[in-house]
Image (cartoon, rainbow, N blue to C red):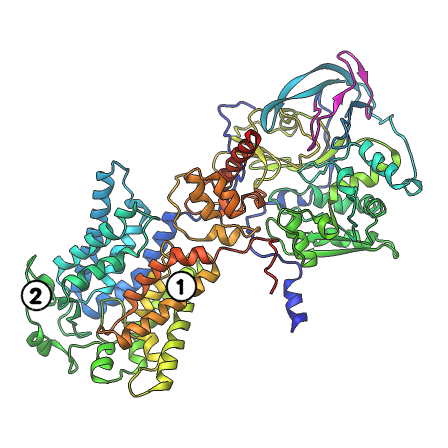
Amino acid sequence: MSKKHIVLHTAPHVKKPQDVPTIMRHVVYALLPIVAFAVYQFGISVLALVIVTTLACLGTERFFNWMGNKPSSLSDWSSTISGILLALTLPPGFPLWMAAVAGIAGIAIGKAVFGGIGYNVFNPALVGRAFVQAAFPVAITTWTPAFFTGRFTEFVPSSLTAPFMMPPETAEWVKQVAVDGFSGATPLSLHKFQHIATSPMDLFTGTVAGSAGETSALLILVCGLYLVIRKMMNWQIPAWIFVGVVATSGVLYLINPEKFADPMFMLFSGGLMLGAMFMASDMVGSPLTPKGVMIYGLLIGFLTVLIRQFGSLSEGIMYAILLGNAATPLIDTWTQPRLFGARRKSA
Amino acid sequence: MLALFEKFRKGRFSHGIHPRYHKDATRGKAIQRLAFPPRLIVPVAQHIGAPAKPVVNVGQEVLRGQIIAEADGFMSVPVHAPATGVVSSIGLMPSAAGPKVLSIVIEVYKASSQYVLYGNPVEPETLDHDELIQRVQATGMAGLGGAAFPSHVKLRIPHGKTAHTLVVNGCECEPYLTCDHRVMLEQPQDLLQGIRYALHITGAKRAIVGIEDNKADAATAIKAALKPDDPITVELVETKYPQGAEKMLLKSLLGVEVPAGGLPIDIGIVVNNVGTLAQLGKLLPKGEGLIERVVTVTGTNVAKAGNYLMPIGTPVRFILEQLGITADHEKVILGGPMMGMSLPSLDVPITKGTSGLLVFQERTFLEGENDTAVFPCIKCSRCVDACPMHLNPAQMGWLAGKRHYAEMESDFHLNSCFECGCCSFVCPSNIPLVQYFRIAKAVNREQKGKA
């Protein structure tokens, strides 16, 4: 045996093939159909939105690598996910310069300051969205009608707002292009402020107004399922969130069906599906054990309904997930796995 | 309802992993005898406990089966000459673990018939308990499953405890290894004889042979060899790593958990490996010593992969030459891929605890791409879901990164980790978790030694 060199390595000598970049890359794949549908629904404005947020996230990540004299971490795909997710949570006509601010803030405040991938407490995409929600409250609640005419050839006027300027009024433009008497509201705000219900089927297929990539519950479910099948996502997280949402809203609905929305509507409206599937299930911000995941999921579901029904905003999933992220370290300390062979506490 | 639940629980423990098994290359290969090497390197410490003390001198001729090193106290077993020849040196030789160990080197006589001429036949049934324990010790038996724990120590029930069940471990859950599988198929009589002796010695009322369900043919072979009055049952358990860890096996077979920090005997159970008991069944009545074992030799591009019977002390280099393995292999492993050791040198011998010899070319020993870049922990919880001891490897990994070794032990049960490697196997960030834990344990032991 001619030997050039021998590799010395401690056991184990075999390894499961999935590594971090692989997992993250597949999350990006799973998001692409949702992006495609968003572009189909709202046109090139959304495409521009996705490109801007992703570039902003990647650029910020690279900048912090450079600041910390670290090698580039762009190849782990995690900031790409944040960029795409962020775009999907914004209104289709959101001014692009504000979207860039959201991307920069999301990675800078949400991830880089904690030490990069794996160290962040909060979901970076949601940190970015929360930042612009506070900074630009009007722009982030200005909606665009779905399937408006000419969406593949022209931008929504507000998209191309000059940096540091407020977006123009779009009410007149909406009247011109909307196919159906669009009122400039999402199903959630319609229900909350005007008590108009949207049909569950429309919510399910996504033919309604809303944030760029949050409208089609069905599509998001299917894409999430892909990750579950590939064993790259913990299905228990969205499952427990759904349970939490249905239970909380179910109780409220039984108390007062006039005032409160029914559980099905709650489940398929707003950003809940996207948030539960792709943001709450982010590995970094969620607990480790099945028991912890249960508490986390139920908490997010409960908070979402609470914020939607009793808060001043019509949507609640974003803050619910951020609060869930914040609670994760505490949940983790409460729910350590029970050691094999440990004496059970005598009841 | 409860019965249904029982049905589900049967044959299972929670967590663990499913690596690729790669057993097809050798599972169908009958045990063959390998040629005797020109030189044997026989370490005096091939078992856990005190090393044996050499009783031969340089230049002395030894006969196959003759005692060449005596047990040093109760936690020790003797070593027998694996072949007839002459002792050429007694000194430090390389070992798989790294540090050199005291070994007796024997130049094998080429013309010898290599019959075993040493023996002290006896009918084990006629002996009392203490004599039996002595007899087992005299065979030099140490666990052949890999841990090499002296068998007589395991079979002697400590004071104040009784054994009601003997569990026989035929899981062989490590990928690539098939030596136990072949022993069960080819030597069921020896195995059953060994089980009967073990029952007799421990006083256990029944024996259960636990075999992973990918080796159903072995279970059939053992069942076919059973006598009607044998209190021995054979049960299939789920094929999953580390099913062969005794605590996991007991959970699967009996649904019991060995108390943390305790041993199976604490709940009245003795566990032994099938290979060990098969050898015991063969050697005990003859009064001979353990001088050879079956080793699975396999890996990438190994034309003559198979299960080979070879004298203990056979150098790895000789085995590779015999099987025509000449290509550049980057990694040579003694044992299985999950818990075995990669060799620093090819002059390391096969010992009592060596179950496999695996040779790998670069990058082929990984299931996926050999990307060794280490990422920060992303809290994916795969290690938590894989750890069969239900530890929290993620948390311990963070603590290890900060060198908080004492805290790992006091707050996170570090010492319950038996280093199966599941956590490192599944980690997508390629964090060497189990390697961290080994270091942490070693540092803690050192600290305690100082205190």
> Element type at marker 2?
loop
What is the number of callouts on the image?
2
Image check: A320 left or right of B171? left
Residue appearing at x 61%, y 42% in the figure: B176
Asked whether the viewer can see residue A222, the reply is yes
Identify residue for label 2: A167
Q: Residue A296 carries which label?
A: 1
Image check: B417 left or right of A269? right
Picture coordinates of residue B420 (x, y %)?
Answer: 57, 44
Q: Which residue range is magenta in the image?
A: B42-66
Label whose residue precedes the other's in the sequence (1 or 2): 2
Magenta stretch contains residue B406: no
Task: Identify the amino acid type marked 1.
Answer: Tyr
Could you tell me what secondary structure mostly forms the magenta stretch?
loop
> Looking at the image, which residue sits at the far right?
B126
Which of the 4 image quadrants contains residue A129? Answer: bottom left
